[in-house]
Amino acid sequence: MPHPVLTKSGVRWALAAGAVAAGAWWFGDQAPYPYSRSRLLDLQLPCLTSSNLDSVLRPRPGERMLEVGPGTGLQSLHVAPQLGPDGRLDVLDIQPEMLDHVLRGAQRRGITNIRPTRADARELPFADGTFDALYLVTALGEIPEPGRVLAEAVRVLAPGGRLVVGEFFDRHWIPFGTLHRLADGSGLHLAGRHGSTFAYLARFHPCPATA
């Protein structure tokens, strides 16, 4: 007797179930990503791993950085220790539940240089030239008016600062070509890129005229 999973009927049911699951994931995806589904944010995505982020972001001791949309802190808790006791990582999110989650994780690990801010990324509550670097991983596409977010990033970056954007194919993602055009319009120039068509990390620097 053939294994039921290998019958034509079984294959059809498996494909149908997969399609339903994919549809639920795609059409149920919300922006901002709801805290009720936060466990999925702890998964390392292809091309967006912590080691790949390090190679593009290049965190250094003593720097002050801003992460927009930290989720549950997958990257925050990795980056902050690299900044050392004289450095600082600010994390900004519109959802206080996400910020609380990050701080609980930091407390468990003894990380003391993370500072939370609840705010809209289109109006960053920081002075001009505050940060050495700013990064967003799978967050920019979930924020309305991403061009305004990039313009604010340029404003709060110090001269010579860097912006890193990570995107992964989902309902809200920003294709690289679109991001590049938005970055050009915000006074940013591309300095490097890592990844593939559907998952990438890109580093930008403010053009000298806008720094």
Image (tube, rainbow, N blue to C red):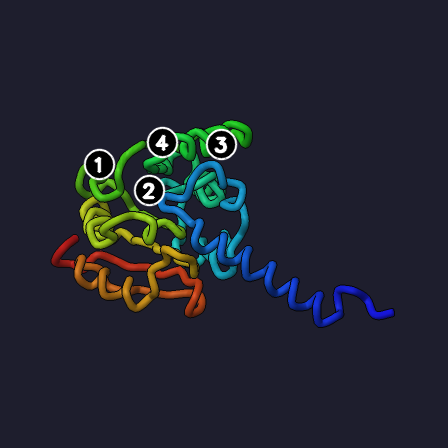
Q: What kind of element bears circle 2?
A: strand
Name the residue tied to disc 3.
106
Q: Which image quarter: residue 196?
A: bottom left
The image shows residue 178, relative to residue 78, as above or below, that is below
Q: Cα distance, mark 2 to mark 4?
A: 10 Å
Report whether residue 50 is seen. yes
Name the residue tied to disc 1.
126
Q: What kind of element bears circle 1?
A: loop
Q: Cα distance, mark 1 to mark 4?
A: 13 Å
The image shows residue 14, relative to residue 145, as above or below, that is below
2 or 3: tag closer to the N-terminus: 2
Rendered location of residue 24, percent (x, y): 49, 53
Name the residue tied to disc 2.
66
4 or 3: tag closer to the N-terminus: 3
Q: Cα distance, mark 4 to mark 3?
A: 11 Å
Dots 3 and 1: beta carbons under 8 Å?
no
| CA neighbours of label 3 inside 10 A, class few (<14), some (14 to 19), many (20+) | many
Q: What kind of element bears circle 4?
A: strand
2 or 4: tag closer to the N-terminus: 2
Name the side, left or right, on which 206 lies relative to 10: left
Dots 1 and 4: beta carbons under 8 Å?
no
Q: Residue furthest left?
A: 209
Q: Nearer the viewer, residue 194 or 182?
A: 182
Name the side, left or right, on which 99 lies relative to 39: left
Q: Nearer the viewer, residue 63 or 52?
A: 52
Q: Nearer the viewer, residue 154 or 86?
A: 154
Rendered location of residue 4, percent (x, y): 78, 64
Q: How many marks?
A: 4
- Identify the amino acid type marked 4: Pro
- Identify the amino acid type marked 2: Leu
Name the residue tied to disc 4.
116
